[in-house]
Image (spheres, coloured by chain):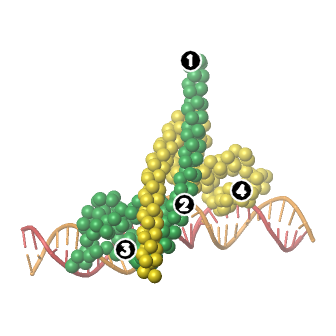
Chain colours: A green, B yellow, C orange, D red
Amino acid sequence: MTIAEVSEKFGLSQDTLRYYERIGLIPPVTRNRSGNREYSEEDIKWVDFIKCMRQSAGLPVEALIEYVALFQQGDNTLVTRKELLVEQRDRLAAKLEEMTSTLVRLNDKIVRYEQTIVLKEKTLHKRN
Amino acid sequence: MTIAEVSEKFGLSQDTLRYYERIGLIPPVTRNRSGNREYSEEDIKWVDFIKCMRQSAGLPVEALIEYVALFQQGDNTLVTRKELLVEQRDRLAAKLEEMTSTLVRLNDKIVRYEQTIVLKEKTLHKRN
DNA sequence: ATCCCATATGGAGTTAACTCCAAGTCAAGC
DNA sequence: GCTTGACTTGGAGTTAACTCCATATGGGAT
C-alpha cells in the first residue's frame, strides 16, 4: 500500500504518517526500489494500533515511542513492554472512571436545565 | 478566598486561574477594594465546574467559553445553553464508548503478552 | 526528451492551552 | 517611611503534536 492509500484508509494525513515514522511512533516503513514507502501488512497493523492508542485512548506519544523502541529490541524486552502497557491500561481505566462521573454530572446539569425550561414555559402560559 | 487558596484547593496554578478568567472560561471574579481577586462561592463553583469539564471530560475550551458567555447573557439563553451541553454530553458519551473498546483492546494485548511470557519461561525451564 | 505527478526530505510554521516574565500596586510589619 | 510579599496586568515564551513548505527525485504518459 502506498502512503496515499494508507492515509485514505486511516484518515491520517500523509504528513502525519511521515511524522509518526520520523519520531519513532511507528517502526521504519518498508520502501520500494525508488525509496517510496510501501506499507506492508505489518506496517499497516502498526498504523492501526498507534492511531487507536493516540486518537481514541489518548496515550502519550512518549510512552508509545518507548513501546515501539522496546519492540524493535526484540524478545528480551517482552516483560518491560507488558509492564508499559499495563501502566497505560491502568491510567486509561482511571481516566474512564473519571470521565464517566463527569458524564453523570453533565447529565444532571442537563436535567436541571430541562426542568427550569419547562417551569419557564408554564409561567409564560399563565401570563398569556 | 484568595487566588492562592483557590490555586491550592484545585491544583490549578494562579496563572491558569487568571488565564481562564482572561479568556472568559470563567466569569469575572469578585475583587476586593485593592483590586485583588476574592473568590466568592459562586466563583469557586465556576472554577470547580470548568476544571472538571476541561481536565476530566476534555471539553473544548471554545465550547466552554461560549457556555459562559451565554450564561452571562441571562435567562433567555437557557435553551441554547442546554443544547450546547447536550451536544457536548453526546460527544463525551461517544468518546467514552470509543475509549472503552480501546481499553478492551489494550487488555487483550496484555493478556497475549502474559501468555507469551509464560511460554518463554517454560521453554527456558526445559532447557536448563 | 519532456512534462507531470506522487513521493521524498529537512526544517520552518501553526495551534491550543497554558506558563512565564517584567514592571507596577497595595497592605502589613518593623 | 521603608521593605516585603502577595497580588495585579499585558505580553512574550513554551510545549506537544502536528502541518506546511521548498526543493529534489523517480517513474509513466505524450
Give the left or right position of residue D27, taking residue A40 as reference: left
Cα separation, mark 1 vs mark 2, equals 57 Å
Give the distance between the C-alpha atoms of the residues marked 4 and 3, in whole angstroms.
44 Å
In what element is the residue under mark 2? Answer: helix
Identify the mark at residue A27; answer none if there is no mark. Answer: 3
Disc 3 chain ID: A
Q: Secondary structure at mark 3?
A: loop
Disc 2 versus disc 4: nearer the observer: 2
C-alpha gap between disc 4 and disc 1: 48 Å
Amino acid carrying label 1: it is Asn
Q: Nearer the viewer, residue B122 or A69?
A: B122
Viewer-side residue, A86 vs D11: A86
Is there one chain holding both mark 3 and mark 2? Answer: yes
The disc at residue A128 is 1
The chain identifier of the residue carrying mark 2 reads: A
Determine whether the residue tagged by mark 1 lies in a helix, strand or loop.
loop
Marks 1 and 2 belong to one chain: yes
Residue for point 50% across, 40% down = B86
Q: Position of residue B23 (x, y in %)?
A: 58, 54
CA–CA distance in space, label 3 to label 2: 25 Å
Q: Is residue A65 visible?
A: no
Q: Which residue is mark 2?
A: A90
Q: Give the quadrant of the C terminus of chain A.
A: top right
